[in-house]
Amino acid sequence: MRNLITDVPGVKVGNAHDARAATGVTAAVFDRSCVASVATLGGAPGDRAVTLLEPEMTRGMIDAVVLSGGSLYGLDAAGGVSAVLCGQGKGAAFGGIVLPVAVQAILFDLMNGGEKDWLRTPVERRPPYWDLGRDAALAVGEDFALGTAGAGYGATTANLKGGLGSASQRTRSGFVVGALAAVNAVGVATIGDSRHFWAGAYEQGDEFGGHGFPAKIPPEALELRFKGQPAPATATTIALVATDATLTKAECKRLAIMANDGLARALRPVHAPNDGDTVFAVSTSRAGPGGEPAALTELGAAAADCLARAVARGVHEATALPYATSLPDYRRRFGG
Amino acid sequence: MRNLITDVPGVKVGNAHDARAATGVTAAVFDRSCVASVATLGGAPGDRAVTLLEPEMTRGMIDAVVLSGGSLYGLDAAGGVSAVLCGQGKGAAFGGIVLPVAVQAILFDLMNGGEKDWLRTPVERRPPYWDLGRDAALAVGEDFALGTAGAGYGATTANLKGGLGSASQRTRSGFVVGALAAVNAVGVATIGDSRHFWAGAYEQGDEFGGHGFPAKIPPEALELRFKGQPAPATATTIALVATDATLTKAECKRLAIMANDGLARALRPVHAPNDGDTVFAVSTSRAGPGGEPAALTELGAAAADCLARAVARGVHEATALPYATSLPDYRRRFGG
């Protein structure tokens, strides 16, 4: 086990970034089309091709999940991913037509200090996201970078650099569950200004420092801190959870809803008016059925745990951006 | 009154198409940001930036609605529209950042005979939709072509060429309501093989031929006819209704739901598993409040009527594509 979402057989992940623009794209691509759904609990989401993921809709299978910076400009990224998949013959076939389904969510990283050239001459100069999506899809593999990488490249939290995180586990029933998150929350992942993560209770080994959870939380650590006070600032954590258990689309929807509980445990506040907080859930259906209520409860709890851990790892692995206004990263702040 | 959605003050529409690929894009752009929502009742939708339109989401205002061919490949179009709007300074401003909100729905026109070059060398050759979106946004005005134009360029119904339609009316309360539809339905807009439209009961003047509604419908005209029997075929009618009445986002959602009734009256079958049938509703908020139940009932009924008429006009105005397999157009079939 790599402690990455790619521990789920059939899931590969690739990153691409534009260092000058301080933004990037992460693509999760599936060896075979997967059953999927989504649950969006943040108030300011941006997404592409997500309505088809609702349980009452016909299409059951998707080929990629794309996480991207760039806010709404970033929604071109799934186009680049789709081009790569089309070239590989991946997706539904209609007559001679190959139609991959790449669903996407974005985060807002437009004010992080990077040079967003396309905002100055937008008709002449396209945003970089279609190309970044293509490059991320071409880069997929079982290993991929965490922290300041892919969709987490330009991400921040309210007090520290954010980033791309991942985690995985095997359930008692023998299923594999994994999570992938680009952490750009309105809130914080740490308990106050301490080195402890809110996700500390769920840490496996020392995957994000091994500092555990504090026995007592000082009152000042509960004082609310979030981006953009008093003016609003957009933010958003976007994520994917995956399992090899065989699930229906409605069961994937349940998995996505339960996985959002991992965000609730790892970030404070979260699901806020200016968070987008979109969680996709996919079933590669390589293992046995997991939709019976007890089995799905176990999968949902594992997905929430993995997603909470992925959030902490995303912050723990991040490297600060180089600008004068850039937030510090966890390691520079706390060592390790 | 032009009998176009642009009769609603503050709404402009532009078309762009690629004749060789037999596809296109229509952009509706608003002079000022509009309150908006969406109701998607077809089973196979494809869309961009639509979750933010739900009433529980924070963002209340949008700057453009993009209708496009290309199925999921077409979802790049809103990127081109956004680039134009960004260059014009349209959209929300965050610090120095301009962020236009362009929402989008697509229809499936990939198997209509046009040369979809990008499907053969997809990584090297981008789909044309980003460029078509840019061109449509640059072309907006109060007059625009109907029929084989914009997002309706490559559209079909089960028995006749489909197309882009529009209609408008003034309500008893003095509000203006308009509809815009790209008609690519699984079903048919005509009553059997007759020249009568299902929308005939709502026709104003002779806007789609003036043939009215038949006094008696022959049983064979009720025999169900739809695309893709026995194999499924994707299709989709996508639409926008607009009013100058001042509405909240929740009231726009209600307007979008009632407007779908216009699709129900104009197409048989509709809202099918392989239809995407996404209807956006926007309020330009230039006139008085329209959300009180009686007022909103009148607006919703007018939106449904306008959308039914827009569907019939889209078919009535269309010109057949030039391929051997192309469906005939209404005028060639029935004259006029």
Image (spheres, coloured by chain):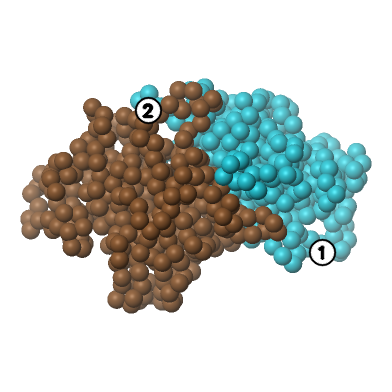
Chain colours: A cyan, B brown
Please state the horizontal and vertical placement of residue A208, each as a whole percent of the image: 82, 40
Please state the horizontal and vertical placement of residue B234, each as a whole percent of the image: 35, 37
What's the chain of the residue with tag 2?
Answer: B
Q: Are marks 2 and 1 on the same chain?
A: no
What's the chain of the residue with tag 1?
Answer: A
Q: Which three-letter amino acid code belongs to the residue tagged 2?
A: Glu
| Residue B90 relative to residue B189: left or right | right
| Residue A175 relative to residue A1: left or right | left
Q: Does residue B34 show up?
A: yes
Please state the horizontal and vertical placement of residue A186, each as a whole percent of the image: 72, 55
Q: Nearer the viewer, residue B161 or B194?
A: B161
Which mark identifies residue B115?
2
Report which quarter residue B236 is drawn in: top left
Q: Which three-letter amino acid code belongs to the residue tagged 1?
A: Glu
Task: Report helix, strand or loop for mark 2.
Answer: loop
Tell me the residue that label 1 is attached to.
A223
Please state the horizontal and vertical placement of residue B107, each as a whole percent of the image: 38, 42
Q: Does residue A257 show up?
A: no
Mark 1 Cα shell of 10 Å, populated few (<14), some (14-19), many (≥20): few
In the picture, the quarter occupied by the C terminus of chain A is top right
Report which quarter residue B180 is drawn in: bottom left
